[in-house]
């Protein structure tokens, strides 16, 4: 979200986005741009593409594209996340 983006020590340049995202209530979301940031997971840095959204309730949301690309397994019953590959 915008608040989390503004807290970054080094803010990357935001690239224009040509997509439209809608909130769960169907309203269009205000997109500020996209950037690539290194996501630190278990001591590994994973370059990840993010879309910065104004007024998003969560700091970030990882989508299934991230999980598929990095071969992420989520074991809900034992509260464990496993990343098998860093792309």
Image (spheres, rainbow, N blue to C red):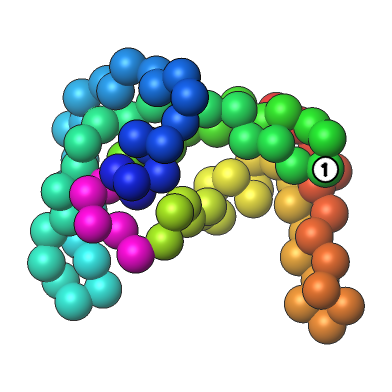
Question: What segment is highlighted magenta in the picture?
Answer: 53-57
In depth, the one of 26 and 8 nearer the eye is 8
Percent x, y for residue 28? 12, 58
* Residue depicted at 17% across the width and 55% down the height: 29
Q: Let me know if residue 61 is in the magenta part.
A: no
- Judge whether 74 appears above or below 44 on screen: below
Q: Please indicate whether residue 50 sits to the left or right of residue 42 in the image.
A: left
In depth, the one of 81 and 72 nearer the eye is 81
Task: Tell me if I can see residue 36 in this picture.
Answer: no
In the rendered image, the residue lying farthest to the bottom is 77
**Residue 25 figure quarter:** bottom left
**Residue 56 figure quarter:** bottom left
Percent x, y for residue 81? 80, 60
In depth, the one of 7 and 26 nearer the eye is 7
- Magenta span: predominant SS is loop
| Residue of label 1 | 42
Dot 1 falls on a residue whose secondary structure is: loop
In the rendered image, the residue lying farthest to the left is 27
* Residue depicted at 42% across the width and 36% down the height: 7
Percent x, y for residue 8? 46, 31
The crowd level at tag 1 (other Cα within 10 Å; few <14, some 14-19, many 20+) is: few
* Residue depicted at 63% across the width and 35% down the height: 39
Percent x, y for residue 18? 18, 33
Q: Please indicate whether residue 76 sits to the left or right of residue 46 in the image.
A: right
């Amino acid at each position: 979200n915008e608040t989390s983006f503004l807290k970054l020590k080094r803010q990357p340049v935001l690239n224009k986005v040509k997509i439209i995202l809608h909130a769960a209530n169907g309203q269009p979301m205000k997109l500020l741009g996209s950037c690539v940031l290194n996501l630190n997971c278990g001591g590994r840095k994973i370059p990840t593409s993010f879309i910065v959204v104004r007024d998003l309730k969560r700091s970030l949301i990882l989508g299934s594209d991230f999980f598929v690309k990095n071969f992420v397994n989520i074991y809900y019953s034992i509260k464990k996340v496993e990343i098998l590959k860093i792309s």
